[in-house]
């Protein structure tokens, strides 16, 4: 009788076939990573990718395997060599932290452990809650407050403003929707507010017009008297004032609203008081400058970013909410496969009940490890250091006749421009934009530009633990040099 011979096929896996080879490559990658950070000052801040590198990112989907050493070689040549540059000590374009090696190790270990922080009874979940507790302590929130780690400032603000909307709607918005709100809600912020708040209004179904931008004073802080007038006008017109958004460090100039005055007004008018502290909330831990954010502890909710002045590798944002019940009530749901239990893995807290993500990465570990290594006091001193560096740069600019300083340097953002030999309007803007581009293209420094009340300025946001004062001296020297070159090229022969 014929017998059928079965062919046994081994099950596949993504684990390496040779762990020793992977171990050797991993050691090489770590060695390269240490050198990458150690020598960052010796590299250009930024450089343009050549055509062959751009072409690399158009390669088709791989169907067959490749040796992992070759894969890493591709990454080293085409990715690591052309970064945004924000870890470089002369990167001041946008308000970003500059990461740290311990935090990078934390990200690696978090990926190795592989936990999903949606919830459950496991160590990563407890560490997530612990980091939130530490952040509450840093800004002066009570232990009874709530919080959640998110991707960054935009999401942190959306979470806080969602709780504000639901708390002030007057109806069960989760069940009935925004169309059932009896009176249209009004939110208030300064005309220097970050664009993420418009996105929040749109995502919350309220629309951009629900966010009323209030004029600012000479220091670019929200005009509290104008705010009071706007609230009265809206009430008289049939709107429901719901929330005032204070800014602890505006994105354009670093202006800090009078948070104590806003807290008092919010209490008087029965408004939710939300603070966008993604830039400056953590000044609360800075011994020399913490008074700049006095009143932040009175907020109903705060958005902040550990990946800025705690220098956690991207991404790491956080929303803190004083009323833990209102926070959970805004997001908690019951899913059949995610039921709590008195024992075992499901007996832990379901962290997804405090935000929009069910799947949540282990963001806490990189923050936790760096705080344990350095201590919160060192991070506070680094914040003071950046603020002192910004004031030093402002002084250098004021001492140069060819340069001009704009708004007061409140924290660590300096807005300035080259006078361009007396140019004005669009010609002056083009002159300064060319300086900005050449600074970037020559790998010298990365600054950005912005427009404040119709005026164009260059902008240096110093949120980097590697920056030194001689870097700022270099920025001023090179700005003057490039300015002279542009003027010479424009002069008739």
Image (cartoon, helix red, strand yellow):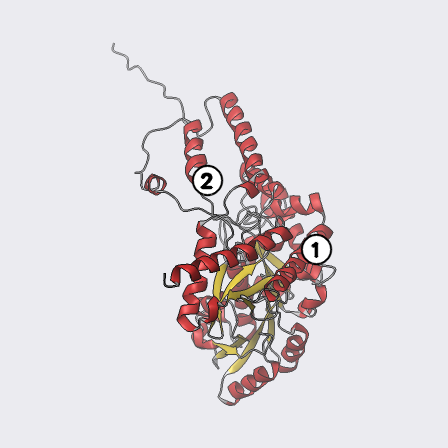
Quarter of the figure with the C terminus: bottom left
In the rendered image, is residue 269 in sight?
yes
The residue lying toward the viewer, choosing from 251 and 225, is: 251
Q: Which residue is mark 2?
A: 81
Q: Residue at x 44, y 77 (%)?
A: 209
Q: Residue at position x 72%, y 48% from top? A: 375
Q: Is residue 70 above or below residue 156?
A: above
**Is 357 in front, or is 153?**
153
Which residue is most to the front?
A: 493
Q: Which residue is mark 1?
A: 380
> Residue, x 52% and y 42% (percent of image)?
43
Q: Secondary structure at mark 1?
A: helix
Q: Position of residue 282 (x, y in %)?
A: 65, 59
Mark toward the start of the polypeptide (1 vs 2): 2
Q: Which quadrant holds the N terminus?
A: top left
Q: Quadrant of residue 396?
A: bottom right
Residue 310, visible in the rendered structure: no
Q: Residues within 10 Å of mark 1 (few under 14, many from 20)?
A: many
- For label 2, the SS is loop
Query: Which residue appears farthest toward the top when viewing the image?
Result: 1
In the displayed structure, 300 sits above or below 218; it is above
Q: Residue furthest bottom?
A: 236
Res 113 → quadrant: top right
Relative height, residue 299 to residue 82 (above, below): below
Q: Position of residue 108 (x, y in %)?
A: 56, 38
Residue at x 71%, y 51% (from the top left corner) = 376
| Residue farthest along the left direction in this orientation | 2
């Amino acid at each position: 009788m014929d017998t059928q011979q079965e062919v046994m096929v081994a099950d596949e896996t993504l684990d390496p076939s040779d762990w020793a080879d992977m171990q050797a490559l991993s050691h090489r990658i770590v060695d390269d990573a240490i050198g990458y950070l150690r020598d960052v000052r010796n590299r250009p801040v930024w450089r343009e990718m050549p055509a062959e590198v751009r072409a690399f990112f158009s390669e088709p989907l791989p169907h067959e395997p490749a040796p992992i050493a070759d894969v890493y070689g591709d990454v080293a040549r085409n990715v690591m060599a052309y970064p945004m540059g924000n870890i470089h000590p002369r990167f001041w374009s946008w308000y970003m932290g500059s990461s740290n090696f311990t935090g990078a190790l934390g990200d690696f270990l978090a990926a190795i452990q592989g936990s999903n922080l949606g919830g459950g009874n496991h160590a990563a979940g407890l560490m997530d809650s612990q980091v939130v507790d530490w952040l509450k302590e840093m800004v002066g929130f009570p232990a009874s407050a709530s919080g959640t780690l998110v991707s960054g400032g935009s999401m942190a603000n959306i979470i806080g403003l969602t709780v504000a909307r639901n708390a002030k709607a007057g109806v069960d918005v989760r069940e009935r929707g925004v169309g059932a709100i009896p009176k249209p809600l009004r939110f208030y912020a300064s005309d220097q507010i970050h664009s993420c708040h418009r996105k929040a209004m749109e995502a919350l179904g309220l629309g951009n017009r629900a966010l009323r931008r209030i004029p600012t004073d000479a220091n670019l802080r929200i005009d509290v008297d104008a705010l009071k007038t706007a609230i009265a006008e809206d009430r008289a017109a049939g709107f429901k004032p719901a929330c005032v958004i204070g800014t602890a460090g505006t994105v354009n100039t670093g202006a800090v609203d009078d948070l104590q005055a806003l807290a008092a007004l919010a209490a008087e008018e029965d408004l939710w008081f939300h603070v966008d502290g993604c830039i400056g909330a953590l000044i609360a831990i800075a011994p020399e400058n913490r008074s700049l954010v006095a009143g932040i502890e009175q907020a109903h909710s705060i958005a902040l970013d550990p990946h800025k002045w705690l220098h956690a590798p991207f991404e790491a944002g956080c929303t803190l909410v004083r009323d833990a019940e209102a926070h959970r009530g805004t997001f908690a749901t019951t899913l059949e496969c995610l039921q709590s239990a008195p024992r075992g893995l499901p007996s832990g807290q379901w962290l997804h009940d405090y935000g929009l993500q069910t799947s949540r990465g282990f963001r806490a570990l990189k923050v936790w490890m760096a705080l344990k290594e350095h201590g919160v006091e060192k991070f506070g001193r680094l914040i003071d250091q950046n603020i002192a560096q910004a004031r030093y740069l402002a002084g250098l600019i004021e001492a140069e006749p060819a340069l001009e300083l704009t708004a007061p340097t409140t924290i660590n953002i300096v807005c300035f421009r080259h006078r361009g030999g007396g140019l004005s309007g669009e010609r002056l803007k083009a002159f300064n934009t060319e300086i900005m581009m050449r600074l970037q293209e020559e790998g010298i420094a990365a600054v950005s530009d912005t427009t404040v009340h119709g005026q164009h300025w260059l902008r240096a946001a110093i949120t980097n633990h590697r920056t030194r004062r001689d870097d700022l001296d270099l920025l001023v020297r090179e700005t003057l040099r490039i300015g002279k070159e542009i003027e010479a090229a424009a002069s008739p022969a």
